Amino acid sequence: MKTHRLWIKISSNWRVLLIILVPAIMLYAFVIMLSPSSLIVNNGKADLSGIDFSRDKLVSLNGQWEFYWNKLLMPEDFHSGQRLHMDSFMKVPGVWSDQAGSHYTRQGFATYKLTLYYPSILKDPALRIQNVANAYKLFINGQLTAEVGSALDNKARFKNEDKIIIIDLPKDTNKIDLVFQVGNLNCATGGLRVAPVFGSRQALEQQRIIMIILQMLFIGGVLIFGIYYLFLFLLQTKNKTALIFAVFCFITAIRSLVWGETPLTILFPNASLDLRMYINYLTGYNYVAVVILFVYSLFPLEFNKKIMGVILFPSLIFDALILINSPEIMTFYTNYLYVLLLLQMIYIMCVLMKAVLRKRDNAVFLFMAICVLIWAMNEDIINFVKIGNNNLTYMFLFGNLAVILAMSYVQARQQAMNHKKLILYNEKLLEADKLKDKIMATEMSFLQAQIKPHFLYNALSAIANVCEKNGKQAGKLIIDLAIYLRGSLEFNNLDKMVTVEKELEFVDTYFHIEQARFGQKIQLKKEIEIPLDVQIPVLILQPLVENAVRHGISKKPDGGTVTVRMLQKDEKICIEIEDDGVGISDEKLATLLNESGQDNSVGLLNIHNRLLKLYGRGLEISSEAGHTCVKLLIPEAAL
């Protein structure tokens, strides 16, 4: 007992330690991300001449670029001899409105300048440029090299665009001047949001191809997960967890199309920037909300529905704003979105901590996965708003991969547990079915035991009478009685099958004994038109023949005939037991196959129930004065 209590205490302490340790590691990771990285560009110059690029090394040109606010300077302006007033050195990557102590407005235009030194022996120097907010022209050594968007200083004609391009740089030189004219006249932020990357063109293209392949594989894998769990929900409509997880997978896959290498522009080259922005905002506003719904489907008792409603309702407001505003206007709501996401993240972490402390199934595993996802999302937010200097866009994909695998594991484990429960349930049903068979067999034996004393007394009396007249015949009757009793006592398996020939022999044995009592006033007639080796349920015929003798022909003064008829009819074996006895009244016939009709029809209801169980169809009884027929049909396919 003491050991058990100690183990519970250790287990509880371990959960508390996990709840404290994981967020602490996340916080440490955030601090590392926020810490300043080494600056390649200092005071508008970057000297890469001492770097070995032979091993496919790539360098992000982050640091302090020359910055000229509200001026679209041409390369020749820097060589005109006229002294230019530089506003400041601007941090790249970053947006100019976030510059510490800056007076720069969100919208406007500016010129960035960088003097770059690199080894002249580099065979294919190149520059990768992406995510310049929101239109630009690039001049290299005085030549216009790239233009994305247009009308940088005219709001009426301004057009923004976002492309990933790789530009060849001059060879056989060790110095170039980069002049960026950047304009932002319709969105909330402007500037070089991602630092240009320098290196060998081959290395840059190789890196992009690898990242595109990895990103497409990720999207394809997530879509497969989503389709699988959508089908699972369609087959199990009560499994809301599967539906929410499918929606989460689809949102992740769609959002991944406009991140990183933007595979959407590869699959659909004509996809507009507005479409990509709509996808970005729609998936971003609902992403964490779907995660909350998923966790709620697993741990509903840990949630306060009022708090959850307050946390989720703003996501609906943001969705409505998207429908009535242009994507450019939505950029001004981005900071509010980040506040909402932060609150939702804090709430989901608190819920999962509560689930861990309460020792809910899969809570620890899901808690760690959600922590990874939240860490990746926060890094992505930090990277987007350019608080730090890291360019780790793909962490968003890695975080998603971790949480999707975790969610899939949770779902798979639940399915496995449900499958085990189903197997156990089926085993219990089989045991119950076997128990039912045993009970029915016991009931049948009990009912047979009720009639045997009466039949046995009459049979022995008849044999005694025959003994006085014909000892040889009496010996045959004793053998028949022994065969009859053995057959009756061997009836211990309701599903046992015997041949028609065997059943008819048992009927003959019974009839020989009865004729010893009633003489030739009772007769047995057989019309068999099916093979004698056909298998039928055991002890079906004899009880029906016995019923016809006892309640039909034996009650007529002059006796009668029992006819056993077997024939093939419409792919079924038709068996009829007819007698020309006294018949059955309509009142009694109506209740003959009910419990109330068992007083004078021992065995009929049991045979009826056995046939229902085996073939889904029981006895059919018809009767009128002087004639009774009991009919049963056995499907040929069941033989």
Image (cartoon, rainbow, N blue to C red):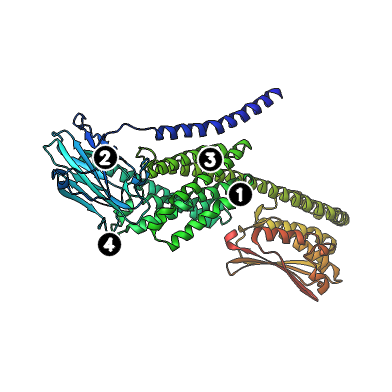
Label 1, label 2: how far apart the Cα atoms are? 47 Å
- Of badges 1 and 4, the one in the foreground is 4
Which label lies toward us, 3 or 1? Answer: 1
Q: Secondary structure at mark 1?
A: helix
Which of these two is toward me, 543 or 314? 314
| Label located before the other in sequence (4 or 3) | 4
**C-alpha gap between disc 2 and disc 3:** 44 Å
Q: Residues within 10 Å of mark 1 (few under 14, many from 20)?
A: few
Disc 2, disc 3: CB below 8 Å? no
Mark 1 lies on residue: 307
SS class, disc 2:
strand
Number of other residues with Cα within 10 Å of mark 2, as a class: few under 14, some 14 to 19, many 20 or more: many
Seen as rendered, the residue at the extreme top is 2
Q: Residues within 10 Å of mark 4 (few under 14, many from 20)?
A: few
Contact between labelled residues 3 and 4, with CB atoms less than 8 Å apart: no
Q: Earlier in the sequence, mark 4 or mark 2?
A: 2
Q: Is residue 467 visible?
A: no
Image: 578 above or below 354: below
Provide the residue designation for mark 3: 366
